[in-house]
Amino acid sequence: MHGNKSTVEDVDVMESLFVFALIWSVGASIIDGDRPRFDQFVKQLSQKTLVNVAGKNKLPKDETLFDYYFDLIKRMPMQWTPWSKQVTEYVPPQPFEFSKVIVSTIDTVRNRYFLHHLTQSGNNILFVGESGTAKTNTIQNYLLHIDREKYSAVNINFSSRTTSLNVQKTLMDNIEKRGPVWSPLNGKKLLVFVDDLNMPQVDTYGTQQPIALLKFLTERNMMYEREGDLEAIHTKSLFWIAAMLPPGRGRNYVDPRFVSLFATFNVIFPSKDSLLRIYSSILKCHTEQFNGEVQMAASQLTPMTMSFYQSITERLPPTPSKFHYCNEAASLLTHKQKKKGLCQSLPSKYTTSSSFVRLWRNEILRVFGDRMNVQEDKDLLEKNLLPALLQQFFNTDPTLQTSVLKTPILFGSFEQNNSDTIAMYQDLKDYSNVKMVFEEVLRKYNLENNGNKIRLVLFEDALEHIVRIHRILKLPRGNALLVGVGGSGKQSLTKLATFCCNYDLFEIKLTRNYCEHDFREDLKKLYQKLGTGKDCTFLFTDAQVATSRFWN
Ligand SMILES: Nc1ncnc2c1ncn2[C@@H]1O[C@H](COP(=O)(O)OP(=O)(O)OP(=O)(O)O)[C@@H](O)[C@H]1O
Ligand SMILES: [Mg+2]
């Protein structure tokens, strides 16, 4: 399985290898709930002794075979080893970029192991898993660290608008003709990562054209020219890594004959322990420079957030009118949004546990509360927060309660002419402070945009909204979807927040017959602007969606 060609003569090793291969071939696509049953079945078939500490010829009793691998390389004598042995300490990415954070867990090491060994041995690999199981992250992270001497990589993101021609063009840009065969540039092997594989539209004949092309290419290593003489293009050294959401629930099924060309793995959602490990590692690392009191509070916040999250998702599940409420599967993303906020804090601004816990409360209210569209639900959220805080903090130090629960709760980074935004994410304490800042911003805006003045009365609700929008615009990769009745100031507040961030505002202008082509041209202009290093807010309203194709 991993290209180690040395002969194995030990029967026990052979048998163990067979069991390992069985688990990760037949069993690899089995969903989480059925894994224990499959494990029991294989253990029974193998007739091996079950023990507490697994060895060469003995299988683990209390854990499943999915939690172990047969270590043929590092361990002498070869033996069954828990994946957890490979889990390493969290190291933040350098330079720190939140989207690149990946904390080593059983799932990530396991997925990496298969990515490595299967691509090395020339197999195609497909990860199927719910949103937030880090499919994209794990694969991209793996591709970042491949041996660049031997491999190059290309990323293709499928959407419902992807056509087979798009795919072919991307591939052709990455291969060149050498003799009769097309091969990757510079004589390397090419790893093609196709993300969201099942997204392309299903046509009248039940086919997804990009997938039909890939099937042809994977199976026969050839495709045809699209113009000219329609000559055959023979390829070599192309290897495929793909990821997709499980089919069903509105997602497309992919041709099973195509899937059969891949080693398919069901990527499971991280266990509670893994989740705890992910969040606490990120927060622990972030608060290393903070004083002891804050570090202590931070260590208590992660388990608290998790149980809080569970109780709130049970009480406020998504429903048709509240489809945007969180569900279990989205938890990693939601938690990460919150951590993103916490990671904006700097030691100089947060010197006491109360200030840090207050920041945490703000992030909870922003990430969970801001999406709630009924006051009742917002109240429930606050009500649920209290017992958790009481139990962890207020009972031991009642003075904390007043400072943490004080309203209004407004956090942001507003000092202007200072490019170091992280340094400024802080408690703004009062409406009057925020009002002062924004009245000044509004005055400046109107001076600069004489013909296009914004007339706004900055009452308290408007201030709260603008602080929220501003907070999101300042977060790396921050996107906001503002939902509200017409005239509630969504656009004006966004314009003002953008001006306050010192970003440019980019909007499309709908004209008669504005079509997808115009939209693409506009997007090109946006990218050119971004290329100059200028930060931009892309303001896009529902009235500008001339066709739903714009979404893709
Ligand atoms: N072990 C981990 N360490 C750090 N972050 C993680 C880990 N696992 C998942 N995440 C985070 O969860 C989020 C989702 O990851 P990612 O986008 O890769 O998921 P996905 O499976 O590709 O989801 P989708 O199907 O929606 O594209 C990311 O923010 C990712 O960083
Ligand atoms: Mg993804």
Image (tube, grey):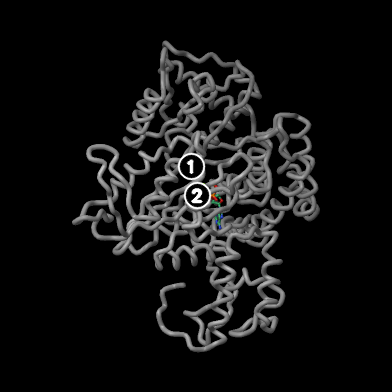
Which label was assigned to residue 191? none
Is mark 2 in CB contact (under 8 Å) with mark 1?
A: yes
* Quarter of image, res 283: bottom right
**Can you name the residue that lies furthest to the left here?**
179
Residue 183 percent location from the top left of the image: 27, 56
From this view, report whether residue 363 is shown above or below residue 41: above
Identify the residue shown where x is 49% and y is 44%.
422
Which label was assigned to residue 98? 2
> Left or right: 486 with respect to 77?
right
Residue 190 percent location from the top left of the image: 33, 57
Tell me the CA gap for discs 2 and 1.
8 Å
Which three-letter amino acid code belongs to the residue tagged 2?
Answer: Phe
Q: How many marks?
A: 2
Tell which of 513 and 527 is nearer to you.
513
Identify the residue shown where x is 33% and y is 44%.
170
Q: Which residue is mark 1?
A: 476
Other residues around mark 1 within 10 Å, as few (<14) / some (14–19) / many (≥20)? few
Tell which of 260 and 482 is nearer to you.
260
Q: Label 2: state its secondary structure.
A: helix
Which three-letter amino acid code belongs to the residue tagged 1?
Answer: Pro
The reply to whether residue 221 is in sight is yes
Q: Label 1: state its secondary structure.
A: loop
Tell which of 341 and 1 is nearer to you.
1
Q: Of callouts 2 and 1, which one flags the residue occurring earlier in the amino acid sequence?
A: 2
Identify the residue shown where x is 62% and y is 48%.
335
> Left or right: 236 with respect to 366?
left
Identify the residue shown where x is 37% and y is 43%.
167
Residue 488 percent location from the top left of the image: 62, 19
Q: Is mark 2 within 8 Å of ligand 1?
A: yes
Tell which of 414 and 139 is nearer to you.
139
